[in-house]
Image (spheres, rainbow, N blue to C red):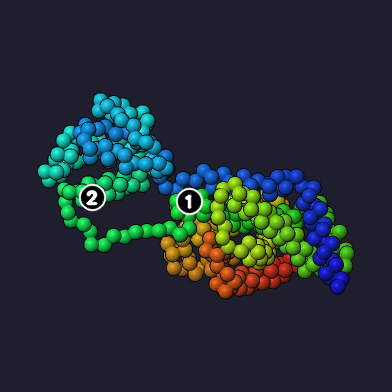
Amino acid sequence: MNKTAHVFWLVLKELTSLRHDRVLLLFLVYAFSVAIYMPAAGSVIGVHHASVAIVDEDRSYLSRQVSAALLPPEFQHPVLLPYDQLDAAMDTGRYTFIIDVPPHFQTDLNAGRGPTLQINVDATAMSQAFMGAGYIARIFEKELENYRSRGHDTLTPPIKLVTHSLFNPNLNGGWFLAVIQIVNNITIMAIVLTGTALLREREHGTLDHLLVMPLTPFEIMLSKIGSNALVVVGCTGLSLEGVVRYALGVPLTGSMTLFLCATATYLFAANSLGIFLATLARSTPQFGLLAIPVIIPMLLLSGGSTPLESMPVWLQWAMQLSPSTHFVSLSSAILFRDAGLDLVWPDLLALAAIGSIFFGFTLLRFRSSLAS
């Protein structure tokens, strides 16, 4: 009973200390609001609102159909451009794509002479240029097939593939990015908050006061993990509801309770790692230098930024030892695919096991650092 009371009052002490730290509070608010909304709202993974101009030297039915096939939101409405302004428009970067339809294009196509349609691409707009050229090629191929099927060519493909997107029908990359940003920020805050809290107490002499009290290293460490988990889990729930669901309009179909429980389990491991790094550092700047090479691989190699399947096999196995890998898998399964406990329990079990190992190893290091 005394141990539970000790942990409870230590948790209150940690929360009070955080309440008076305005810099960390501002960073916490920013991490779960602006840092979630801006990347997700401004992310453009595919072609979006690309500028297009058409030099129509044919002025036929087919050239008008080709122009009308380029529709928002991928492309802006095509602008008719005189032929003598083509080079100047490309040099000034007014349009990402300029399509030149040659004279007698429809007539030559009907006669089977294989006319050439030119697509000029401004490759300096790298994020959209190469993908957009492929989009335009597929759109024009479809329009030409439709044109030929309306009497000029009776051949039809034996199989017609129709794709339906059950979730995220517009393939909006910002929906996925919003959840990944929350997962990444949870990792950052878990390591930073616990590590800086321990170093702040060491620098201010508060840790020496705790050592003369009837407290054990286990209670001190558990209180820091518990207080951080309360703060981060609470901020995560508010961010999911206020920023992701309401501001960004992402339809989160999974169980919020299950996800927050998985977050608490993940924080058990990540907070232990933060305390371990703090025991190695002697100052806050040194802790920051130690945290960077730990946090960055956890963010980049966990499967959120790059699929695990595209990594070398040895790296895939190595990243199974990182709790962030299992947490990313859990987050996508629960929030996007409405997976229940019966499906995600292996990742939860892996998180709990990795967290227990981290906690035990960190506790040994924490005890030795207090004794020295």
Q: Residue visible at 52% across and 43% down?
A: 42
Dot 2, crowdedness within 10 Å: few (<14), some or many (≥20)? some
User: Label 2, label 1: how many angstroms apart (C-alpha)?
Assistant: 30 Å
Residue 194 in view: no
Identify the image quadrant of residue 230: bottom right
Secondary structure under tag 1 reads helix
Labels 2 and 1 touching (C-beta < 8 A)? no
Quick one: 200 or 162, which is closer to the camera?
162
Secondary structure under tag 2 reads helix
Closer to the chain start, of discs 2 and 1, is 2
Dot 1, crowdedness within 10 Å: few (<14), some or many (≥20)? some
Q: Residue visible at 30% across and 38% down?
A: 67
Left or right, residue 250 beside residue 13: left
Instruction: Name the residue type under label 2.
Output: Glu
Tag 1 residue = 173
Instruction: Name the residue type under label 1.
Output: Gly
Left or right, residue 290 beside residue 202: left
Tag 2 residue = 145
Question: In which quadrant is the N terminus drawn?
Answer: bottom right
The spot of residue 335 in percent (x, y) is 56, 61
Quick one: 365 or 298, which is closer to the camera?
298
Q: Residue visible at 26% across and 32% down?
A: 55
Q: Residue furthest front?
A: 151
The spot of residue 277 in percent (x, y) is 67, 60
Residue 108 in view: yes
The spot of residue 291 in percent (x, y) is 63, 55
Identify the image quadrant of residue 7: bottom right
**Position of 256 relative to 97 (above/below):** below
